[in-house]
Amino acid sequence: MVKKMGEPDIAALAKKEIFQKIADGDWYQYGHEPKLQAIVKHSAQVVQHINDVAKTDQAEALKQLHAFLPHLGKDVEIYFPITGIEYPGSLYVGDHSFINSGLQFLSAAKVTIGQYCFIGPNCRFFTPNHHPTNKQLRRDGWQYDLPITIGDDCWFGGDVIFLPGVTVGNNVVIGAGSVVTKDLPDNVIAAGNPARIIRHVDAED
């Protein structure tokens, strides 16, 4: 479930290292974090290069992608082109999962996808968040990240968007074009904006 954030305690945050802030879901200013900027810019270049390789050699592109993403499980396949993966170390994909083209991860926080998942084209995972009512915090670039967790045996249609902090259970089907703003339990079919449960399914089906 997405947690609600108060305003940043700047004095306390100044004592924390940036990656600990991210892990703890604390506020930080991306524009003041050269380490993060370097990761994101380098990752964009690598993804663009791999997409170019895929135009003539899919096998080599997939090999380079596995080298770029250290936490891909066994037999994971991802189709090209990839839209973007900001933080390669934050993406965890379980064994035997498939992700179609157009994948996008804006994700300093951890994104976990389980085993035997089928992710449709142009799905997007967003872990950053900004203050909904304090425009000055937005102007000053404050943000925080919350992890996204996907269970096993899930199937998502094309253009599904996952917002910060959501957890999706095992054996969940989500209709194309849905926006997942809240947690979804095991064994359900959901769709819509925001995504709502349409029906429950038998876990053994």
Image (cartoon, grey):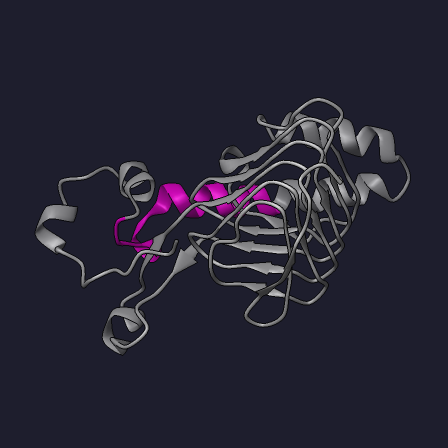
- Res 56 → quadrant: top right
Image location of residue 167, percent across then percent down: 48, 48
- Res 54 → quadrant: top right
Residue closest to the eye, 119 or 153? 153
Asked if the magenta segment contains residue 27, the reply would be: yes
Q: Main secondary structure of the magenta part?
A: helix
Circle count: 0
Residue at the farthest top position: 74
Residue 149 located left or right of residue 187: left
Residue at the farthest right position: 56
Image location of residue 137, percent across then percent down: 25, 69
Whether 24 is drawn above or below 68: the answer is below
Q: Where is the C terminus found, in terms of image quarters?
A: top right
Image location of residue 30, percent across then percent down: 35, 54
Residue closest to the eye, 38 or 174? 174
Q: Residue at x 79, y 43 (%)?
A: 79
Image location of residue 160, percent across then percent down: 65, 60
Q: Residue at x 47, y 54 (%)?
A: 183
Residue 13 located left or right of residue 148: left
Q: Residue at x 10, y 47 (%)?
A: 12
Residue closest to the eye, 196 or 99? 196
- The magenta-colored residue range is 26-44
Residue closest to the eye, 173 or 159? 173
Whether 63 is drawn above or below 135: the answer is above
Residue 77 located left or right of residue 92: right
